[in-house]
Image (cartoon, rainbow, N blue to C red):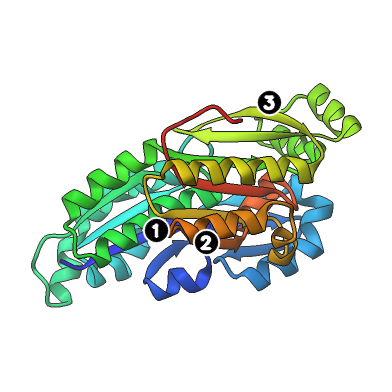
């Protein structure tokens, strides 16, 4: 069985990895004023757009994910021909309509695929499964990497589906933002009042940075630490402890809202990298998607891994 994998462009994994493993990307288009860029996870294009627009006007941006029709067309024009079963893994539905769009498109795809496959000389059934990763950005990458690993190991679609759906429940995403005012402005643009003016003002005045945690589609602060670098170091050290306690998959994903050399210079990064090597954990590093940066701000750091939920210490 030919198994295909699809992610949206908010999934923070290196483009080279996605290409190497034939993972299809659903692009999200970002518009800031007259400037428009379809996010295909091209790090160079993302950084150019970031330096030109996001820092000044990113909070005003509009993000436009693939519509139901665009997803249907992508599948019927290519994916139903190239594959027999496709897993489409999306950013958490609590923060984006991509899951619902893909789910709605799936009904039309399953109704219309037979003639397309027959014209290509294939009369066997086609199936797809839309999976809500229940997380964001680099934490989405945990499910995608596991899907690649299972497919390459020759596992069948039922086992892959069960594993990915269970893994989504245990994927932990942590973020340290740099600019709370930006985060609040962006949240207000999207009618999300999770960052109040008071907390933004106090956080900026006192240089207090929250550590935000996402699991099962719910996001909440788990710590407040003075200074961005100390907060990042605490997060890296927490991740090291989780690695030593045992993860559910041998994967840690990092993404950063800027040049990766800046991230690698942050305190605790080298210890985290060494801990991953010591415990045979694959460490993925990527520039945050443009979609991620316009939503959480330049310079934010996100860490993703799979494990049981534990208090942040």
Quadrant placement of the C terminus: top right
Image quadrant where residue 194 sits = top right
Viewer-nearest residue: 171 or 4 = 171
Residue 94, relative to residue 60: is it above or below? above
Residue carrying label 3: 193
- Residue 175 image position (x, y, % from top left): 63, 42
Residue plotted at (43% across, 51% down): 142
* SS assignment at label 3: loop
Residue 165, relative to residue 4: is it above or below? above
User: What label does residue 284 carry, if any?
Assistant: 2
Question: Does the image show residue 86?
Answer: yes
Viewer-nearest residue: 313 or 44 = 313
- Residue 136 image position (x, y, % from top left): 53, 45
* SS assignment at label 1: helix
Q: Real-space Cα distance between discs 1 and 3?
A: 32 Å
Residue plotted at (52% across, 70% down): 15
Q: Nearer the viewer, mark 3 or mark 2?
A: 2
Q: Earlier in the sequence, mark 1 or mark 3?
A: 1
Viewer-nearest residue: 38 or 287 = 287
Viewer-nearest residue: 109 or 213 = 213
Q: Nearer the viewer, mark 1 or mark 3?
A: 1
* SS assignment at label 2: strand
Residue carrying label 1: 145
- Asked whether the beta carbons under mark 1 and mark 2 sit within 8 Å of each other, the answer is yes
- Residue 244 image position (x, y, % from top left): 47, 45
- Asked whether the beta carbons under mark 1 and mark 3 sit within 8 Å of each other, the answer is no
Image quadrant where residue 7 sits = bottom left
Question: Does the image show residue 97?
Answer: no
């Amino acid at each position: 069985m030919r198994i295909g994998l699809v992610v949206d462009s908010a999934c923070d994994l290196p483009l080279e990895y996605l290409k190497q493993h034939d993972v299809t990307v659903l692009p999200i288009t970002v518009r800031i004023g007259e400037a428009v860029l379809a996010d295909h996870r091209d790090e160079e294009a993302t950084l150019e757009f970031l330096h030109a627009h996001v820092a000044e006007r990113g909070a005003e941006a509009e993000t436009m994910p693939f519509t139901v029709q665009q997803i249907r067309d992508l599948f019927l024009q290519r994916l139903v021909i190239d594959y027999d079963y496709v897993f489409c893994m999306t950013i958490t539905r609590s923060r984006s309509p991509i899951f619902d769009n893909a789910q709605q498109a799936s009904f039309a795809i399953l109704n219309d695929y037979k003639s397309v496959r027959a014209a290509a000389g294939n009369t066997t059934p086609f199936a797809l499964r839309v999976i809500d990763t229940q997380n964001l950005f680099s934490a989405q990458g945990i499910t995608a990497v596991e899907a690649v690993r299972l497919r390459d190991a020759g596992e069948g679609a039922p086992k892959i589906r069960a594993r990915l759906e269970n893994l989504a429940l245990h994927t932990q995403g942590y973020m340290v933002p740099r600019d709370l005012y930006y985060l609040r402005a962006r949240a207000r643009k999207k009618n999300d009042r999770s960052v109040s003016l008071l907390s933004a003002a106090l956080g900026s005045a006192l240089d207090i940075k929250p550590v935000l945690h996402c699991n099962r589609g719910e996001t909440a602060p788990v710590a407040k630490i003075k200074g961005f670098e100390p907060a990042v170091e605490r997060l890296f050290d927490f991740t090291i402890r989780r690695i030593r306690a045992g993860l559910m998959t041998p994967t840690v994903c990092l993404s950063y809202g800027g040049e990766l050399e800046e991230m690698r210079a942050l305190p605790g990064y080298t210890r985290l990298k060494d801990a991953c090597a010591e415990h045979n954990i694959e460490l993925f590093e990527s520039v945050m998607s443009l979609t991620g940066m316009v939503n959480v701000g330049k310079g934010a750091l996100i860490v993703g891994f799979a494990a049981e939920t534990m208090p942040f210490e």
